[in-house]
């Protein structure tokens, strides 16, 4: 990457930010630099009035019903902490040594964890792992006091990780909720009350208006909790009003969160649910706007869930635990979409809504009775659901991210996920890291999604850990379902910067027999094209053979076998050949598994039209004919059906 290229993509990224975001970034970085260099001064300046630490009796926050997995009382007593599935020692002991409570002062423990990944360090200082100590007997309260006083002595105010505003917000909420129970009648009580005042002073002047999004909502949530703990009605009203205003901006008309990540949608919904529960338990009215946003967000989540009950990992995000889903969707079953009029292509939302709250949005045309095809468009979020027979498809036909917040965007426009008989078949590569580098770049890039790449470029210019420059602008053409077939057509201009200004249009047709995908690449010039299908772990791909013994491989076709033993046929039309390679799928933080990726490659003069079908083979190995004309000039390489190298 040349300096001029770096400068260009940086300018394309910054140009989309609002002016006040740039000013806020400069101000916050300056403030944090001062705090980190002068911690004593910071502690004196930010010292607020100690908080009484009041908390409504009977309020059960999300963290109490769904505590982070991993930490245990015994592990904490030993100075070992499990976060994000990875255990690290805090005390200066041999982790393989005998199991015994540590006599060492936690103030001398390694709270810095400098060699740990940044996300693990963030979670260390969230303090939400302390929920392992609730409800708090004598041993748990004594351990909490020992740990908190040790952490407080070791970590100075202004620490660049522990006192980043997002981390301080999560910690403030935890301390407000747990403090009255775990610090009661311990030496930590007065220190914690003083620290609640310190957190309150810090967050007032460190609102993350430079980032916005879920970060800013976390700031507001923490300040609401701190005002409740301080018994300050005026401040409580102020921050509730701020949260309501920001929620109105961030929750879209169809109920989706504007960062367009289902996993972060769950996080924001949990935060709003927490705030509503806190206000109600404290005797404060819950704003109608907040209740409405929660209701719409629950409906949206019910609509995008996979038939296996999983949260789709579109854009950034890690798998959402089932206990959290049960908290967020206590009574919303997966349901088919309601029948309704043709979808509104302009996304005005004028069409009749779908069944109850499980499938909100704009339903497509046709009847959606049992055994028939169905469709649902979430126009504001840019997600579409197609169903037919045992097939369930979720397509991304919307913006990659808000203009002013590209942090969690992937270059996945016109990508899709596919389930068969309730099990995942086509997936995204997912997210396994937030650390900048080749793996982060690969997981955000177009080649990690079920979409089309041109000349190896990304449809949205994702770079760094959380940045995006040039972005795809999608266009929805039509969506309908009738006569047992659901159809969706959309396009985007994410490759307009390439010679000939290519434009990608894609049509999905789903019926009980399977899926047909038609890709039309407009524009001019000669380009390298790739149509990608990212299969789920456990699926196997081989060169397809016609029925009968001793028959040669079938041109441009692959046999697909699911973990359940279902046999499918993947065929393409147009010149080109299949390349199959094993690539990585994220299954958690820093956790990946190998799975096959099928890539149909060709070099062609634009415009060009490509067809692909994924259908079930019969018991005798027969297959249905490929819909539409097929002109295959290059067969799959039967002698080398799988590339030797492994992808990232």
Image (spheres, rainbow, N blue to C red):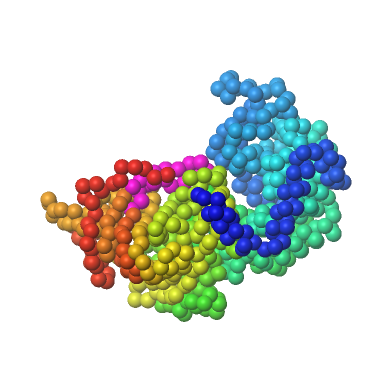
Confirm whether the magenta stretch covers residue 15: no
Could you tell me which residue is drawn at 64 percent across and 42 percent down?
Answer: 122
What main secondary structure does the magenta stretch of the protein show?
strand
Q: Which percent across, then down, holds residue 57? A: 76, 50
Residue 507 shows in the view:
no
Q: Nearer the viewer, residue 7 or 315?
A: 7
Query: Which residue is situated farthest in the top direction here?
Result: 98
Could you tell me which residue is drawn at 72 percent across and 64 percent down?
Answer: 244
Residue 202 shows in the view:
yes
Confirm whether the magenta stretch covers residue 588: yes
Looking at the image, residue 378 sits to the left or right of residue 560; the answer is right
Location of residue 94 with respect to 10 vertically, above or below:
above
Q: Which percent across, then down, holds residue 410? A: 51, 56
Q: Which percent across, then down, holds residue 253? A: 60, 70
Q: Which percent across, then down, holds residue 414? A: 44, 64
Looking at the image, residue 620 sits to the left or right of residue 397; the answer is left
Q: Quadrant of the C terminus?
A: top left
The picture quadrant where one finds residue 480 is: bottom left
Could you tell me which residue is drawn at 80 percent across and 58 percent down?
Answer: 236
Q: Nearer the viewer, residue 574 or 357?
A: 574
Could you tell me which residue is drawn at 75 percent across and 53 percent down?
Answer: 27
Location of residue 293 with respect to 327 vertically, above or below:
below
* Magenta-drawn segment: 581-598
């Amino acid at each position: 990457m040349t300096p001029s290229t770096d400068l260009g993509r940086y300018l394309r990224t910054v140009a989309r930010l609002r002016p006040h975001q740039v000013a806020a970034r400069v101000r916050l970085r300056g403030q944090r630099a001062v705090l980190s260099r002068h911690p004593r001064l910071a502690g004196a300046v930010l010292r607020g009035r100690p908080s009484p630490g009041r908390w409504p009796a009977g309020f059960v926050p999300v963290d109490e019903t769904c505590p982070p997995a991993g930490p245990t009382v015994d592990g904490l007593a030993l100075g070992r902490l499990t976060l994000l599935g990875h255990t690290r020692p805090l005390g200066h002991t041999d982790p393989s040594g005998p199991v015994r409570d540590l006599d060492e002062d936690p103030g001398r423990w390694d709270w810095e964890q400098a060699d740990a990944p940044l996300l693990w360090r963030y979670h260390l200082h969230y303090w939400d792992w302390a929920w392992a100590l609730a409800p708090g007997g004598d041993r748990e309260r004594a351990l909490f006091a020992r740990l908190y006083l040790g952490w407080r002595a070791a970590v100075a105010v202004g620490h660049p990780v522990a006192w980043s505003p997002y981390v301080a917000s999560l910690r403030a909420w935890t301390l407000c909720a747990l403090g009255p129970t775990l610090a009661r009648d311990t030496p930590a009580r007065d220190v914690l009350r003083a620290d609640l005042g310190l957190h309150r002073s810090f967050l007032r002047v460190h609102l993350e208006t430079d980032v916005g999004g879920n970060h800013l909502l976390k700031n507001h949530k923490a300040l609401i909790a701190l005002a409740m703990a301080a018994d300050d009605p005026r401040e409580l009203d102020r921050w509730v009003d701020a949260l309501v205003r920001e929620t109105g901006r961030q929750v879209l008309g169809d109920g989706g969160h504007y960062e367009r990540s289902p996993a972060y949608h769950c996080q924001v919904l949990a935060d709003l649910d927490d705030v509503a529960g806190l206000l109600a338990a404290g005797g404060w009215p819950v704003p109608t706007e907040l209740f409405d946003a929660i209701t719409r967000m629950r409906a949206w989540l019910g609509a995008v869930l996979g038939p296996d009950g999983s949260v789709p990992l579109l854009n950034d995000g890690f798998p959402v635990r089932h206990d959290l889903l049960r908290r967020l969707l206590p009574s919303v079953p997966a349901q088919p979409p309601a029948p309704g009029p043709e979808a509104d292509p302009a996304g005005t939302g004028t069409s009749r809504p779908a069944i109850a709250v499980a499938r909100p949005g704009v339903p497509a045309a046709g009847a959606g009775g049992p055994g028939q095809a169905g469709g649902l468009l979430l126009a504001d979020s840019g997600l579409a659901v197609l169903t037919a027979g045992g097939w369930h498809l979720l397509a991304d036909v919307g913006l990659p991210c808000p203009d002013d917040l590209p942090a969690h965007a992937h270059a996945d426009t016109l990508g899709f996920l596919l389930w068969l008989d309730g099990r995942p078949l086509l997936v995204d590569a997912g997210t396994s890291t937030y650390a900048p580098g080749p793996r982060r770049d690969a997981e955000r890039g177009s080649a990690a999604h079920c979409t089309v790449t041109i000349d190896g470029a990304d449809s949205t210019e994702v770079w760094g850990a959380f940045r995006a420059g040039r972005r795809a602008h999608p266009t929805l053409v039509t969506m309908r379902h009738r006569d047992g077939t659901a159809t969706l057509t959309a396009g985007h201009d994410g490759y307009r910067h390439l010679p000939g200004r290519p434009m990608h249009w894609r049509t999905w047709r789903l019926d009980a027999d399977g899926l047909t995908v038609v890709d039309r690449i407009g524009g001019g010039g000669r380009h390298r094209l790739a149509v990608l299908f990212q299969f789920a772990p456990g699926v196997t791909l081989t060169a397809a053979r016609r029925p009968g013994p001793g028959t040669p491989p079938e041109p441009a076709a692959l046999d697909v076998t699911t973990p359940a033993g279902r046999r499918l046929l993947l065929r393409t039309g147009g010149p080109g050949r299949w390349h199959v390679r094993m690539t990585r799928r994220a299954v958690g933080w820093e956790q990946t598994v190998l799975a096959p990726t099928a890539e149909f490659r060709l070099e062609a003069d634009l415009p060009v039209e490509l067809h692909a079908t994924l259908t079930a083979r019969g018991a005798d190995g027969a297959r249905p004919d490929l819909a539409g004309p097929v002109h295959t000039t290059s067969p799959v390489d039967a002698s080398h059906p799988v590339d030797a190298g492994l992808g990232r």
